[in-house]
Each structure stands twice: as structure tokens, then as C-alpha cells.
Image (tube, grey):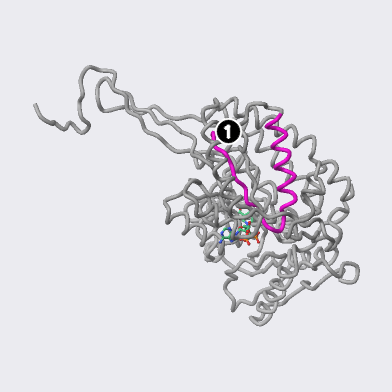
């Protein structure tokens, strides 16, 4: 599918793709995708106003009916999966298989949300007072602000929006300024779903496009009770404090510094595959990408040379070409950050393998790289920053407790995994004395979560949870209600008040 076919299939018009001041280039070859209109502050204010109005209507629509809208939307996504997947590839540079996977994730969360729309369960709680009943309800919250990062330009919105909408909320989306075109395409598909559904209020889903300043409009606006923000820890620190200052709620999904531990009891073939996809997939630009590897000294020489050999033979290139495994970095800044991190590691005594620019002559305006392995010397105990690029730091270890401690000894706490066939090692890793991350896998890598589980991480990753399990509760407000069906008015705790 070429660019024009993608635009046509997604019904993207010249008016939407041209005439604005936000220039969007494809990371694959640097070519211009469009110059997009940005939302100004006044327009953002109107959209928030409309979102409040839409919420007030939508919250009274029965939840299973709200699910019907998401069912229709999921079916539209099925119909447009190839075109939208290709647009994701064009705009953010991940390979086509991963572009398709991202749209599949949207479809999966829609299915989940449709089921959920009949399961927004509260509780009944035993009251201490005779003739009384206590209940817990979950109520819609209000407009939900969704701020998303460039590397999952559509799935992150869907994880949030599908749940928020069945929970009775309206949504306002501020996508990354690097990937507004996929956002426009998704907004149009959602509007088509609303039209087919027939009973959705106007403005149920809103899109505001621009840089961080327009995101700040959402962050600072008291009419938006929940901000779900995905991006760097720097962004989350700023957003979290501003929303807390107005007593709003946040779901923060921030940076990771994910590690894999390979024990002497590991199936090394599995470990090899898990590490390769985790470290190299999406060109190291997933929040769950594998950044650190702790390999036991007894298996180090069987595993690390094999990884290096595989790194030497990776197919790097056009992400739309189905044979490619490694697409480009998002932009020049990202490339420069990678080079700086590699220089720093070399200064610390790290032995760097790969890491240089690739295909520069063919694509002078794009930033392809050879994924890097850095064997770290024993003198360096850890790497504590996230560099959003394919760098895998490898450490040799000799005892598991220390390896787990080193894995945990970073500010971030998103994803982690252990490769072992020893049940005691696996159970230790997933115990209270094991990994301190939101995700702790056994015999699979750090990246590639399924939507059925709650997704998110601890510490500077922000503590938010999205997607499956009971993450929906984050999009609702909890109400406790005590009802008296007796003729008496006994007070709680046996308090006597008057005669
Ligand atoms: P980024 O922080 O630069 O930007 C993310 C979004 O936040 C963009 O839409 C941006 O415009 C907006 N933004 C930035 N500062 C803001 C502010 N002060 N107020 C309001 N909005 C603001 O991140 P990025 O480069 O797009 O994405 C990469 C980062 O995202 C990595 O750190 C990665 O680990 C993280 N990430 C995390 C998850 C997760 O689920 N934990 C998922 C994807 C990406």
C-alpha cells in the first residue's frame, strides 16, 4: 500500500493534511506526510466545553448500550486494519507487522470493553446497623484527557478511550506532535462509528493537535477530572504535579528501564528469542523494550556471542518492506541521544558492539541505526537512565539475589523478566522479594503485553494501570451508599445522640 492508497482508504483529505504549521515527516525516508493544522487555545477551550456537554448526555446512556458503540468501532477497525497499520508504519516508523499488531491491540481492547460494558460491578457490603444496606457504585467521571506518546500513536488512545467510553465518559485526545495524522485517521473512524450507532452525543471524542503547550490546556483545566498521560518521566513529573495541584486524578504511564535475567537453568534458545525481540523490536522504541540484560557467568559465553552474531545479521530498512526487522529511529534527536549514551558507556569501560548509523546514503533524511550491544565492565553496577533507542547493556552476574537487586536498583519500574526452568528461581522472581516492576514475566521477554492484564509500572514509571483486569475503575468514581429501610435511625458505632 503506498501513501496515496493509505490516505484514500482512511478517507484523509487534503484539507486535513495540508495548510497547517505542524510539519510531519515520515521517519522511514524523511518525506513530508503533511502539514497539519494545530488547535489553538481558544479552540481547545471550546472542545473541552463540548466534551463536558457530551459527557452529561452520555453518562445516562446504559452501559451495555455504550458498549454497542465500541463494538461498532471495533468492527470498523477490523475493516481498516491494513490501512491504519500501514499509516502507523508510515508516521512512526515501526515495521508493518508491528503497525498491524498495534491496530490489533485496538481491536482487542474494544472487544474487552464491550464485555466490560455488562460487568461494571459494584459491591454490596454488610451494614452494622439493622434494616440497613450498604452498596458501592461506580459512576462515570467526566471528560478524560488522553495525552499520548509517538511510539504507540493509536493503541494507547484506544486502551484509554475504549474503557473510558463504556464507563460513561467523554474523551479528549492530545496525540504526540510527531504522530498527528494517525490520530486524525482514528478520530474519523470513531466519528463514523458514532454516526452508525446513531445515538452518541456530538463531541463524545475530541482531538486537539499541537505541542506540549496544548497538552497543558488539558492538564490545567478543572473541567477534566482525569488525565491519562503516556510519555517520558520528565513529562509525567510535570503533568502529575499540575493535576495534583488542582486535585484531579492521573493515570501516568511513563518511561521504563526494563531488564531480563538469564539464569544458568534457562532454556537459552527461548532466552535468545525473547531478548532479541525485546531489545531490537520497534528499534528499541517501546516503553517495555529490553534495555538491560543480566546473564549468569556460567551461560554468558553461550548466549552473548550468539546475540552478537544475530545483531550482525539483522535486516534494517524500509519499515513497510515485510522483510525488514528493524525500522528507523523517530528523528535526529533520538539518534543523537543514542550516540551520546554509547559514548558515555564507552567512557565507563563498556565494550560497544554496533550502534552506528545505517543506510545513510540511501536515506540521508532518515535515521536508521545498527542496534547496539554494550558489554558492561564489572566496575559499573547499573545503567539508570532510559535511552529511547536500541541499546542493550549486558552485565555478568554470579548470584540471583544480587541480580534481582541490581535489576530493581533503577528509578523506573515498568517491565522485567526472568528466563529459567527452575521453579524456585521463577517463584522468587515473582514473589514479594523479587521484581519490583508492574510487569514480571517468566520465560517471555519484557515487551509485548496482552490487553487482558493491567498494564503499567511502579516508581518513576508513574504507578498508573491501563487496559485489562480492573483498570476500568481508574475511569470511574466510587460511590458508597447506605440505605435505611427500617423505621429507626440507629447511628454507626452505636453512638447515642439525644434521647
Ligand atoms: P514525551 O514525554 O516527549 O511526549 C509524550 C506526550 O506528552 C506528547 O504528546 C507531548 O506533546 C506531551 N507532553 C510533553 N510534555 C508535556 C507537558 N509538560 N504537559 C503536557 N503534555 C506534555 O514522550 P515521547 O518521546 O513521545 O515518547 C517516549 C516516551 O514515552 C518514553 O519515555 C517511553 O518509555 C514512554 N512511553 C511509556 C509508555 C507506558 O505505557 N509506560 C508507553 C509508550 C511510551
> Which span of residues is magenta-colored?
167-195
Residue 116 vertical placement versus 273 (above, below)? above
Q: Is residue 101 visible?
A: yes
The quarter of the picture showing ligand 1? bottom right
Viewer-side residue, 372 vs 479: 479
Residue 187 vertical placement versus 32 (above, below)? above
> Does 463 lie within the magenta span?
no
Viewer-side residue, 269 vs 37: 37
Residue named by callout 1: 166
Q: Report the residue that reaches farthest toward the front.
A: 42
Q: Residue at x 46, y 33 (%)?
A: 138
Q: Residue at x 54, y 34 (%)?
A: 167
Residue 277, position in %: x, y? 74, 56
The image quarter in which residue 217 lies? bottom right
Q: Residue at x 68, y 49 (%)?
A: 448
The image quarter in which residue 135 lies? top left
**Does 120 sit left or right of 160 as displayed?**
left
Residue 308 vertical placement versus 447 (above, below)? below
**Does 215 sit left or right of 77 as displayed?**
left
**Does 193 sit left or right of 244 as displayed?**
right
Q: Is residue 259 visible?
A: no
Viewer-side residue, 457 vs 226: 226
In which quadrant of the rendered image does the C terminus lie? Answer: top left
The image quarter in which residue 284 lies? bottom right
At numbered mark 1, what does the secondary structure look like: helix, strand or loop?
Answer: helix
Q: Residue at x 56, y 47 (%)?
A: 145
Residue 444, position in %: x, y? 67, 50
**Does 129 sit left or right of 136 as displayed?**
left
Amino acid at each position: 500500500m503506498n501513501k496515496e492508497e493509505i490516505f484514500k482508504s482512511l478517507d484523509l483529505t487534503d484539507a486535513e493534511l495540508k495548510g497547517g504549521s505542524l510539519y510531519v515527516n515520515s521517519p522511514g525516508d524523511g518525506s513530508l506526510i503533511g502539514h497539519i493544522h494545530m488547535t489553538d487555545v481558544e479552540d481547545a477551550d471550546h472542545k473541552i466545553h463540548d466534551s463536558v456537554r457530551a459527557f452529561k448526555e452520555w453518562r445516562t446512556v446504559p452501559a451495555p448500550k455504550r458498549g454497542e458503540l465500541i463494538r461498532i468501532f471495533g468492527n470498523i477497525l477490523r475493516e481498516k486494519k491494513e490501512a491504519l497499520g500501514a499509516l502507523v508504519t508510515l508516521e512512526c516508523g515501526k515495521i508493518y507487522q508491528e503497525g498491524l499488531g498495534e491496530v490489533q491491540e485496538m481491536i482487542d481492547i474494544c472487544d474487552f470493553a464491550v464485555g466490560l460494558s455488562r460487568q461494571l460491578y459494584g459491591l454490596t457490603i454488610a451494614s452494622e446497623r439493622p434494616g440497613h444496606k450498604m452498596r458501592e457504585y461506580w459512576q462515570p467521571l467526566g471528560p478524560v484527557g488522553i495525552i499520548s506518546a509517538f511510539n504507540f500513536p493509536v493503541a494507547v488512545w484506544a486502551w484509554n478511550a475504549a474503557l473510558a467510553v463504556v464507563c460513561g465518559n467523554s474523551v479528549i485526545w492530545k496525540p504526540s506532535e510527531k504522530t498527528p495524522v494517525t490520530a486524525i485517521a482514528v478520530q474519523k473512524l470513531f466519528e463514523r462509528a458514532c454516526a452508525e450507532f446513531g445515538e452518541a452525543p456530538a463531541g463524545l471524542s475530541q482531538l486537539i493537535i499541537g505541542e506540549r503547550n496544548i497538552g497543558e490546556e488539558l492538564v490545567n483545566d478543572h473541567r477534566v477530572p482525569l488525565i491519562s498521560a503516556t510519555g517520558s518521566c520528565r513529562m509525567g513529573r510535570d503533568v502529575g504535579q499540575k493535576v495534583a495541584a488542582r486535585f484531579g486524578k492521573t493515570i501516568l504511564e511513563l518511561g521504563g528501564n526494563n531488564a531480563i535475567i538469564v539464569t544458568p537453568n534457562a532454556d537459552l534458545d527461548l532466552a535468545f528469542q525473547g531478548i532479541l525481540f525485546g531489545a531490537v523490536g520497534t528499534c528499541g522504541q517501546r516503553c517495555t523494550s529490553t534495555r538491560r540484560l543480566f546473564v549468569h557467568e556460567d551461560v554468558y559465553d553461550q548466549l552473548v556471542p550468539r546475540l552478537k552474531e544475530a545483531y550482525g545479521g539483522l535486516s534494517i530498512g524500509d519499515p513497510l518492506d515485510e522483510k525488514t526487522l528493524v525500522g528507523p529511529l523517530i528523528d535526529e534527536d533520538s539518534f543523537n541521544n543514542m550516540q551520546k549514551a554509547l559514548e558515555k558507556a564507552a567512557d565507563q569501560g563498556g565494550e560497544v558492539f554496533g550502534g552506528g548509523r545505517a543506510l545513510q546514503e540511501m536515506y540521508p533524511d532518515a535515521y536508521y541505526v545498527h542496534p547496539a550491544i554494550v558489554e558492561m565492565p564489572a566496575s559499573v553496577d547499573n545503567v539508570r537512565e532510559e535511552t529511547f533507542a536500541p541499546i542493550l547493556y549486558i552485565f555478568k552476574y554470579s548470584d540471583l539475589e544480587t541480580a534481582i537487586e541490581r535489576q530493581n536498583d533503577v528509578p523506573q519500574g515498568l517491565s522485567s523478566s526472568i528466563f529459567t526452568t527452575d521453579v524456585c528461581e521463577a517463584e522468587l522472581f515473582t514473589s514479594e522479594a523479587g521484581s519490583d516492576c508492574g510487569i514480571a514475566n517468566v520465560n517471555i521477554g519484557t515487551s509485548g503485553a496482552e490487553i487482558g492484564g493491567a498494564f503499567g509500572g511502579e516508581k518513576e514509571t508513574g504507578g498508573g494501570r491501563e487496559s485489562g483486569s480492573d483498570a476500568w475503575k481508574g475511569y470511574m468514581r466510587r460511590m458508597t451508599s447506605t440505605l435505611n429501610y427500617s423505621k429507626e435511625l440507629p447511628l454507626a458505632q452505636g453512638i447515642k445522640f439525644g434521647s
